[in-house]
Amino acid sequence: MSNVVNTDNTKGDMGFSVTALVGAAAKGEEPFKSPAGNAAVLANLYRQYTYFIMRKDYAEKNGVTTVGDMIEKKLPVRFATLKPGTASEFTIRSIFEKGFGVGWKDIKDWGGSVEFASYSDGKNLLADNHLDCFAFSVGRVASIVMEIETQTEVVILPVDDQARQKMTESLGTVTFEIMPEIYKSVTEPVPTVGDYTCVVIRKDLPEDLVYSLAKAMW
């Protein structure tokens, strides 16, 4: 988030972000207080996949096969994502709010809990049965997911089609599929919200400089 803000207000010329955050900034949506008219995407660098990783015993006990099941059933889920201010927390929170119309408070009202943890802390909390679901955004082949799989049996939940469509309409995200050949807990393609790590840049930089940057990257 800060990279988009600093680029927009000319404290920096360019930085890394994710395209969903740039999309929110352009509209002045939360967490941004006003439209960021001077920030734009120069290039997408690599894909970001959203993972909702749930303990297999919890999913089977409660009949959870998608993220939407967890919400429709209003389960008292012990949930965690990364810390506020990160692209992961923004994306996960946006999926709940824009995709399903619920927020962190709703989960707590159902008797659940919401924690903000690092990758390693979330992994260990899942393994120790202090969490039911840990969600975050990371690349296509993620060592943290493989590490989680070595500690406990899990399922990776698909994000429901309607929620993915609402995210696309609101923030310009796409749909990616988590494929079976990567993770042992995945036996068929899992559709999820997709995004890109990108280079965000000031719109008012000289055109020849931006051209040279793009040419060098290419």
Image: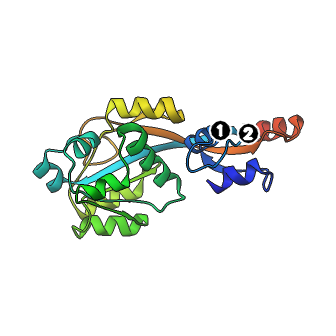
Comparing 154 with 104, the one in front is 104
Task: Tell me how far mark 1 sits from mark 2, CA to CA.
Answer: 6 Å
Residue designated by label 2: 37
Residue 24, position as x, y percentages in the image? 58, 41
**Can you tell which quarter of the image residue 129 is in?**
bottom left
Residue contact at pointers 1 and 2, CB within 8 angstroms: yes
Residue 167: which quarter of the image? top left
The residue indicated by pointer 1 is: 26
Secondary structure state at the residue bearing disc 2: loop
At label 1, the amino acid type is: Ala
**In the depicted view, which residue is nearer to us: 153 or 150?**
153
Mark 1 residue element: helix
Q: Quadrant of residue 179?
A: top left
Residue 128 image position (x, y, % from top left): 23, 70
x, y (%) of residue 160?
Answer: 31, 34
Q: Is residue 201 above or below residue 127?
A: above
Q: Residues within 10 Å of mark 1 (few under 14, many from 20)?
A: many
x 61%, y 49%: residue: 32
